[in-house]
Image (tube, rainbow, N blue to C red):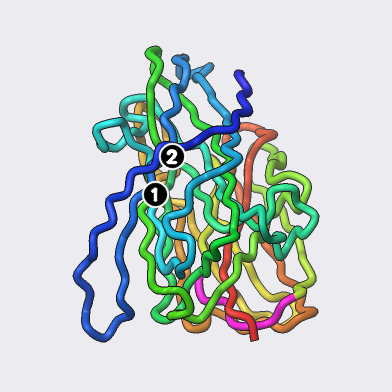
Amino acid sequence: MIFVVAAFAAALAWTGNAAAKPAAAAATQTVTVKYGPWTIPGGTMDRPGELPNVVTAAPKPCSNCDIVGEKPDLVYADGSTADMNTGPMLHHFVISNLAAHDTVCPFSPLGDRIWASGDERTEKTMPDGYGVPVKSLDRWAMLTDLINYSAAPKTVYISITYTIAGAGSTTPVRSLWLDAGGCLTSDYSVPAGPSTHAWTWTSTVGGRVVFANGHQHAGGVHVTASDATTGALICDSPATYDTMGGMRTIVKMGTCSGDPLATVSRGDRLTVTSYYDSPTAKNDVMGIVHAYIAEG
Ligand SMILES: [Cu+2]
C-alpha cells in the first residue's frame, strides 16, 4: 500500500450553469468541482492497488454561499464514470472545514467533516429551505482513499456537483458525524456472521435533524441513528448491493430527509448502531450516519 501525503492544488473545473428551477424555489445553480487527478496503481482482485491522499487545500464551489445539494462521482478525464466495472473504486472521501470544529468530535484534527461518501456516491439534497453555509474564511481539506482492481493504473478525478444558493438564503444546518467507530477512527472490526456495533454521543446541540445518510463497507446490512433519550428514530439507512467487476459491492446507502426527521435536545443521547452480516471477519469496516441539524 502506498501512502501519499501531498499539499495538492486540485484541478478546478467551473461548470457553473444556472439550472432552471421552479419559480417557488430559492434561486440555485450547480457548480461542478473536479478534485484530482490521481493515478491509482494497478493491482489484482485479491490485492488491489490503493492510493490514499490528503488534499490540504481543497477548492470550495463558492466562498460565500449556502450549499443545498451535493452529488459526488468518481470519473475519468473525459467525465465518464469510473467504477469497479473498469477497476476503480471510490473507497471514500471526506471533505472537512479546517476553520471549524467537528460538532460530534471537537478535538478531531480533521476539523468539521461536512461531506463524505464511499463508492455508493450518495447524493445529498437538503429539504427545501435548508443549506450548509460556506463562509469566505472557511478552509476545506479532503481525505481520499482510492482503490483499483484492474491490472492497469487508472487516472481518475473525484467530481462533485454542488447545488448552491445565495448566502443566508437558507436556514443553516451543521454536520453531525455519528460514527460507530467513535471519534478516534472510523474503522472497527466485525466477526463473521451477524453482528452489531453501537456508539453513543451526548448531544451538545439541539434542533431539527433534516437530512441523514449511512455509510458502511461490504458486509454491512444497515446503519441506524436514534435518539435514545426520546426513543425517536432519526434514520435507518439500508445497504443495497449489486455485482460490479465480479464482486458483490454496496451500490447505494439509504438517505433520510424530513422537516424534521427528529427534534433533538441538548443532552440527548444519540446512538448510532451498525448491523453487519459479513461472510468473513474483517478489521476495517465502518458504520456511520452522517446527519445535518438546524439548531434552535
Ligand atoms: Cu468507509
Type of residue at label 2? Tyr
Between marks 1 and 2, how big is the CA–CA gap?
8 Å
Residue 24: percent from left, percent from top: 26, 86
Q: Main secondary structure of the magenta part?
A: strand
* Rendering quarter of residue 250: top left
As for residue 209 lying within the magenta part, the answer is yes
Q: Residues within 10 Å of mark 1 (few under 14, many from 20)?
A: many
Residue 66 vertical position relative to residue 168 in the rendered view, above or below: above
Determine whether the residue tagged by mark 2 lies in a helix, strand or loop. Answer: strand
Whether tag 1 and tag 2 are in contact, CB under 8 A, the answer is yes
Q: Which residue is mark 1?
A: 160
Q: Is residue 148 magenta?
A: no
Q: To which quarter of the image does residue 166 belong? A: bottom left
Local crowd at mark 2 within 10 Å, few (<14), some, or many (≥20)? Answer: many
Residue 278 to residue 225: above or below: above
Say which of 95 and 74 sits in front.
95
Foreground residue, 177 or 273? 177
Q: Is 200 rendered above or below residue 264?
A: above
> Which amino acid type is shown beneath numbered disc 1?
Ile
Identify the image quadrant of the N terminus. Answer: top right
Q: Judge left or right: residue 79 versus residue 57.
A: left
Give the residue number, with chain letter if any, for mark 2: 35
Query: Between disc 1 and disc 2, whose residue precedes?
Result: 2
Split into quadrants, the picture shows ligand 1 in the one at top right
Which range of residues does the magenta coloring cover?
A: 205-211
